[in-house]
Image (cartoon, rainbow, N blue to C red):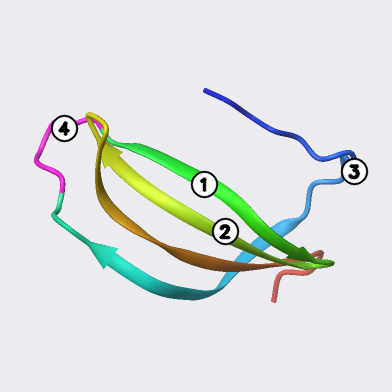
Amino acid sequence: VEIHIRENPIIRIGVVAQIKGLEITRYPQTGEVITTNVKENENFGDVSIYTATISSEGEPIAQGELRVVLTDKIS
């Protein structure tokens, strides 16, 4: 497991604001092990855009783009 921590150690709440271009090739079978890979593409202060890919045994089964907004408040 790779974990990347930014220079700012303050933990904030991330809210998924948008899912774009979601493509699901197939659904995983019961008992199948899946791996999720998330890559940050852009960052605009409190808004980040990520590409996420879900794979099973190296085969991509779903992918899409996530726009995440960071906040300090829960309402």
Range shown magenta = 28-33
Task: From the image, tell me which residue sits under label 2.
Answer: 50
Name the residue carrying label 4.
32
For mark 3, what is the residue?
Answer: 8
First in sequence: mark 3 vs mark 2: 3
The three-letter amino acid code for the residue at tag 1 is: Val
> Residue 33 appears at what percent x and percent y?
23, 30
Q: CA distance from mark 4 to mark 3?
A: 36 Å
- N-term-proximal mark, 4 vs 1: 4
Q: CA distance from mark 4 to mark 1?
A: 20 Å
**Tag 1 near tag 2, CB within 8 Å:** yes
Task: Estimate the spatial distance between the alpha carbons at disc 3 and disc 1, rounded to whole Å.
Answer: 19 Å
Dot 4 crowding, Cα within 10 Å, few <14, some 14–19, many 20+? few
Q: What residue is at 77 percent from the left and 54 percent from the top?
A: 12
Residue named by callout 1: 38
Q: Secondary structure at mark 2?
A: strand
Q: Earlier in the sequence, mark 4 or mark 3?
A: 3
Q: Amino acid at mark 3?
A: Asn
Q: Position of residue 57 (x, y in %)?
A: 22, 29
- Kindly report which numbered mark, 2 or 4, lies closer to the viewer in this rendering: 2
Query: Would you call the spot at circle 3 few (<14 residues within 10 Å), some (14-19), or many (20 or more)?
Result: few
Q: Is residue 5 shown left or right of residue 63?
A: right
**Residues at circles 4 and 3 in contact by the CB criterion of under 8 Å:** no
Which residue is most to the top? Answer: 1
Question: What residue is rendered at 48% in x and 65% in y?
Answer: 65
**Can you tell which quarter of the image residue 45 is in?**
bottom right
Compared to 68, does 59 lie above or below? above
Q: Is residue 47 magenta?
A: no
